[in-house]
Image (cartoon, rainbow, N blue to C red):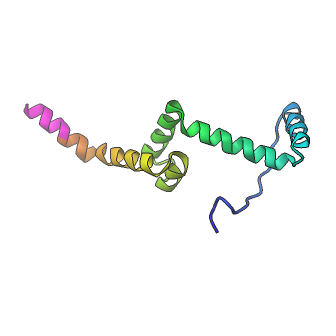
Amino acid sequence: MSSESEKKRVQFRAPRGLVDRADALAAVFETDRTDILISALRDYLRDAAHSDEVKQEIAEAFYDDEITFEELKDLVGHEEAANFRLLKEQLTDEFVDEVAEELADS
């Protein structure tokens, strides 16, 4: 079973007006609040992953080992995650030291 189809219960507090709006939209679409919130969260995450500013924040979290490669891949897609991983490997102290030596020798 993929993580996308597995369910995880979450509970949070939200402003009453926001919840009321979600309930009203759920009534319009003849669905429930959960479906509206899941759809909104999915859209937000998709849009955020396409924002250059957000991608930079995500990359920095990966470079600082705050998120794993798998989490990175889930957020930005496999190809972009692979590029970030390659850059992270290039930014290791050893690589930076090599470049510094080359610059000092030239």
Q: Residue at x 38, y 46 (%)?
A: 83
Specify whether 17 is left or right of 51: right
Residue lying furthest front: 29
Residue lying furthest bottom: 1
Q: In which quarter of the image is residue 9?
A: bottom right
Q: Is residue 21 above or below residue 4?
A: above
**Towards the viewer: 101 or 43:** 43
Specify whether 90 is left or right of 84: left
Q: In which quarter of the image is the N terminus?
A: bottom right
Count of number-bearing discs: 0
Specify whether 8 is left or right of 91: right
Q: Is residue 103 magenta?
A: yes
Q: Is the magenta stretch mostly helix, strand or loop?
A: helix
Q: Quadrant of residue 8?
A: bottom right
Q: Which residue is drawn at 70% across and 43% down?
A: 41
Q: Quadrant of residue 48?
A: top right
Q: Residue at x 40, y 50 (%)?
A: 82
- Where does the image place residue 54, in percent across and percent down from the top left? 53, 34
Q: Quadrant of the C terminus?
A: top left
User: Which range of residues does the magenta coloring cover?
Assistant: 99-106
- Where does the image place residue 52, in percent across and percent down from the top left? 49, 32
Specify whether 47 is left or right of 67: right
- Where does the image place residue 23, in percent across and percent down from the top left? 89, 40
Q: Is residue 53 magenta?
A: no
- Where does the image place residue 57, in percent across and percent down from the top left? 50, 36
Q: In this view, does 17 lie above or below 2?
A: above
Residue lying furthest left: 106
**Towards the viewer: 67 or 71:** 71
**Towards the viewer: 29 or 92:** 29
